[in-house]
Image (tube, rainbow, N blue to C red):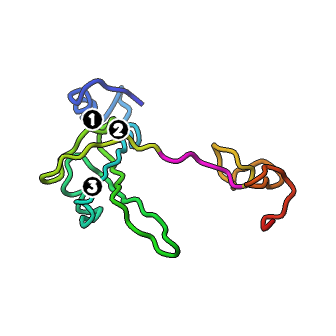
Amino acid sequence: MVELKSNDQAKKLGAIATFLDIPVTVSPHKSLNSSKGVIRSRDLRCCSEEEMVEELRGVTHAWRIKVRRGEDKIQTDTVVLTFDSPKPPSRIRAGYLTLDVRPYVPLPMRCYKCQRYGHGKDRCKKPAAVCVRCGKGGQVERD
């Protein structure tokens, strides 16, 4: 992995096919060259995620946050956007709207077996499950 300071350096490096007679391939890093941000707007409720990717400059992926109301999933006015830059912009223009972009902070991974953070229950090394409410082990799930 090579970190570059400018786009000109990236273009020059991308043109290299061999290094000391060894064939090389140059490609941008997928996660380090992108960032996520959150926007909220009632006016974008009717727009699909595909339309947002097509119309918003610098956006490579979009997904709308949904909430569960009983058995139904309802779309909210909040959209998580993936940008093609290491840092999300502070504002974006969507048609006649200027929207503030907040950094996206995902929920931490939680193990529902030992109730600790940082791993899932499939990778948990604890032998027995821990109660969600009191934190004691050895209880039956339905209790």
Which badge, 2 or 3, comes first in the chain's sequence?
2
Q: Specify whether residue 58 is painted magenta.
A: no
Which badge, 1 or 2, comes first in the chain's sequence?
1
Question: From the viewer's perspective, is residue 97 above or below residue 6?
Answer: below
Spatial separation of the CA atoms under disc 3 and disc 1: 39 Å
Front residue of 16/99: it is 99
Question: From the viewer's perspective, is residue 26 above or below residue 63?
Answer: above
Write down the region rendered in magenta: 106-112
- Name the element at disc 3: loop
- Say which residue label 1 marks: 14
- Say which residue label 2 marks: 33
Check disc 1 and give the amino acid type: Gly
Circles 1, 2 touching at the beta carbon (< 8 Å):
no
Question: From the viewer's perspective, is residue 106 above or below residue 132?
Answer: above
Residue name at image x 21 percent, y 58 percent: 54
Check disc 2 and give the amino acid type: Asn
Residue name at image x 28 percent, y 30 percent: 13
- Say which residue label 3 marks: 41
- Name the element at disc 1: helix
Check disc 3 and give the amino acid type: Ser
Q: In screen coordinates, is 142 left or right of 22?
A: right
